[in-house]
Image: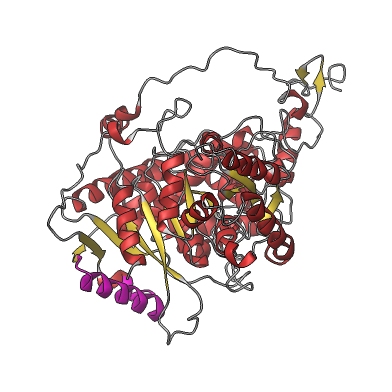
Amino acid sequence: MISEKELAVLASLARIKLTAEEKPSLARDIGAILDYVAQLKKIKPLSVSDSLAKTENFARPQPLREDDEPHRANLMPSANALVRGYVQVKSIFPSAKNDR
Amino acid sequence: MTGKLENLSIARYLTGWRAGDFRASELIAYYREKIARANDQLNVYLEVFDNAAEQAAEADERLARGESPRALEGVPLALKDNILVEGQRASAASRGLENYVAAYDATVVSRLRAAGAIILGRTNMDEFAMGSSTENSAFGPTHNPIAPERVPGGSSGGSAAAVAADLALAALGSDTGGSIRQPAAFCGVVGLKPTYGAVSRYGLIALASSLDQIGPLARTVEDAKLLFDVIRGRDERDATTLSAANQPSAVSPTTRKGRKIKLGVLADELIDGLSPSIANSFRREIERLRIAGYALTEISLPSLYQALAAYYIIVPAEASSNLARYDGFRYGLHRSGADLYDDYCLTRAAGFGLEVRRRIIIGTYALSSGYYDTYYGRAVAVKERLTEEFVAVFRQVDAIITPTTPTAAFKLGEHSADPLQMYLSDMFTVPANLAGLPALTVPIQPEESSLNSSLPLGLQFIAPPFQEDLLFKLGQDHENF
């Protein structure tokens, strides 16, 4: 089960605005799914050393892409708003002066 | 003329084209005309690309000049809408990416182009590959060509339907928990999920990066192999790819010379729990394999019973991370709110459909402090134990057979109100993804006495890592029964 309050917290972490209408059915559906996957609680978790031993095989050197112009002609036009070649967003600390 | 072009395979097309029986441009015109007639009803393609005819004409000219044809010269393919083709839209069937134009080719696309293949268009899918019916597309469901009131399966439903309805020679899809194999079974075509790491994911819109694989859907096993051989291989741009030669296989390929191939079958109780039609069809196939000379033995995978639960923690967890990038600032749908945080929340609410939002929230829950070990940590434990159990089983048998799906194609709308019921369609396909194993589905007919004897089913073969060749052999033997 998941309460609408918990759902609201999760939605804010996921940065998704939910409507009032959809919250009850979402809470119910997500609750049912979480109830189903809760059978995993009976499983013994792996120890940290177990997990590391298995993932180490995949930690191979990652090749780096060569430096080139990242602001390619076919990328920038997709941006929602551009100002002097920069992707424009609202300020992180809202103030009337800075926001467009 | 169109008679010669109907229901071709890649292999028969290449033979006929090279012999001058028809031109590549005729085949493109045939498909475009068929798509124009069928697509309104079936909703297979989200877009047919304009440049296919031009590429086909070039292929014909190359042949006329006597140039040596490349491996897939002039072969028209459909691509799932989550595989990037430079300069073309790729939306993952989401409103959030409805007008996104790909800035680069996926590696599989570069390899297909280098082999001379032609991309006909992008096919419908469940949004961000989340679904098993193609009903979660933001652009309407695809209809099963064999029974249009039913689903084609998902999430590569459009690709499976394109092959089944003869709207392309073959197609590519992606498979995270069965999204190639289940629609292939529902539509009566062949589908391959390669070994994890066999095919590059560069340019595949990610769902769950530890499970996703691109693979072929085709009319024949030979065609699936032809496509796989072109798209496979190490890619510098995807560090999770491995070349078959260098892969650290936990199980060395068993030597089978002079002895019967051993196939593992899951315990009866799992099959008994299915509908009589599926159970009887599957048992019939087992008997045919036994008569054909295969040795069959019962195997056990104790972690199988938790596999689906583990999958439905791991995928939402990884999806919540992978889909965090969609904020509408650099590309995609954008909504403006009161402040920056509001911009994110409104944009993502408007761009993502219900199933996508559900899974992102579940993933956020599973990864959150206090729940991480309870859910995600344990799901990874199941994944690792299941992988070890497969390794042990492959010491006794060469491959494993299962039904591909627990049911035939269900009706549109039948499961869309109950997400958990939808998830159960994946019970036989998910284990191969969790263990990173290659798996092939081939079409079989249900028992004639069953209620839906016109609906195809699938028989699934699962092999050890990088033994796709064994799968192709099993599949082709089955085709020759």
Q: Eyeballing the image, is B336 above or below B172?
A: above
Instruction: From the viewer's side, name the closer residue of B224 and B420.
Output: B224
Reply yes or no: does residue B278 show up in magenta. Answer: yes
Q: Eyeballing the image, is B227 above or below A86?
A: below
Quadrant of image for the C terminus of chain B: bottom left
Residue B223, given in percent of the width and then of the height, sits at 45, 53
Residue B132, given in percent of the width and then of the height, sits at 53, 59
**Residue extending furthest toward the bottom:** B449
Locate residue B405: give its quadrant.
bottom left
**Residue extending furthest toward the left:** B258
Task: Give the residue displayed 66% in from the left and 61% down from the top.
Answer: B141
Task: Give the residue displayed 21% in from the left and 51% down from the top.
Answer: B394
Instruction: From the viewer's side, name the closer residue of B94 and A90.
Output: B94
Task: Give the residue displayed 55% in from the left and 71% down from the top.
Answer: B410
Quadrant of image for the N terminus of chain B: bottom right
Residue A17 visible within the image: no
Position of B275 compared to B357: left or right? left
Point out the stretch of residues depicted in magenta.
B271-294
Residue B178, given in percent of the width and then of the height, sits at 45, 55
